[in-house]
Amino acid sequence: MTLLVAASLVALAGIAQAQQYPNKPIRLIIPTAAGGGPDTIGRAVGQGLSDNLGQPVVVDNRPGASGAIALEVGRLATPDGYTLNIISATQVIRPLVYKVPYALERDFVPVSQLSAQSYVLVVNNNLPVRSVSELVAHVKANPGKLNFASVGQGSQIHLMTELFRTMTGIDVVHVPYKGIAIAYPDLMSGRIHFSFAGIISAQPHVKAGRLRALAVSGQTRMKALPDLPTVAEAGVPGFAVSQWYGLLAPAGTPRRVVEFLSRETNRTLRQPDVAGRIAADGSEAVGSTPQRLAATIKAERAKWTKVIKQAGIKRDE
């Protein structure tokens, strides 16, 4: 009888603890400095969660090493639901090319996908092409003479252009930059011929006529650019790449807490004010189950592993 009472008390204590979560501030670790894409998305979601949960969500910006620093902080945190990490496709790709201290599937549990954003394929305005098919034809007529910009070896922009190159059979030269903003002057002057770029940074140059937009990279057209076809629609069937952001918790975080956070995150993403802030960054709110985000991470890893092998990119140990 005494054992039965003790077991009941333990069960009730567990239920009470679950009902009390969260009862203190939640730390949201973001892998970039203030103002970047992950920061904008993270702050929008964090504020919405704070309002809904009645507890502060404190943003902790930890830029550097393409997100590895932020993930290391999260990996070492207590797995109690009070430390969360924003990740992107970049953090899935990074371990495929560089040595990192984290392993996503070992060190973290997925909570929810937050958003997705297409890239825009832009070309120098003087390049004699006005469509993806014309770009491909022009490059094929000038093998090895044209180049493209990326934000570094093994970056998503680099790998998606390698995928584009493989799927179209073109011969182009890769020119890596430390950031797309640094590449724009060369794109506009003609020293660089084309690149995939984020909509927020590219749109002012496109509107001003300094660059020409040919297509968007995702599976569907962007709400912000409804007249611009996808790369797949424009002649490269099966091509689809998006930048996406997700929410992770440290491995060992109680399942009930992860599921609670997933439900609340999805509810937050459906709120017009949060979705609006995300849309203003050129992204679209998504939301998902933990299982769906896990499947996305697995699919992305397989996709980029294949591209890296086809492109002959060596892992930097």
Image (spheres, rainbow, N blue to C red):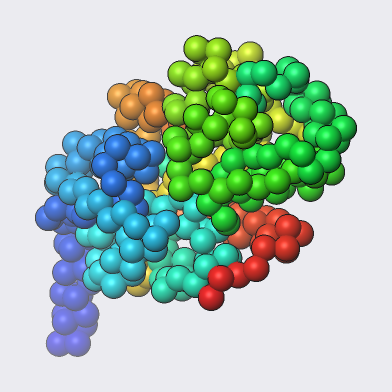
Please name whichever residue, 308 or 113, is drawn nearer the observer in this view of the structure.
308
Check the picture and name the quadrant holding the N terminus.
bottom left
Residue 30 appears left or right of 5: right
At x 65%, y 56%, the residue is 304
At x 73%, y 58%, the residue is 311
Inspect this view and state whether residue 85 appears: no
At x 55%, y 12%, the residue is 209
Please name whichever residue, 121 or 243, is drawn nearer the observer in this view of the structure.
121
Residue 215 location in percent, x, y? 66, 25
Residue 59 appears left or right of 115: left
Inspect this view and state whether residue 70 appears: yes
* Quadrant of the image occupied by residue 308: bottom right
At x 50%, y 31%, the residue is 184
Residue 51 appears left or right of 241: left
The correct choice, above or below, for 36 with respect to 250 in the image is above
Please name whichever residue, 311 or 38, is drawn nearer the observer in this view of the structure.
311
Residue 306 appears left or right of 196: right
The correct choice, above or below, for 33 with respect to 210 in the image is below
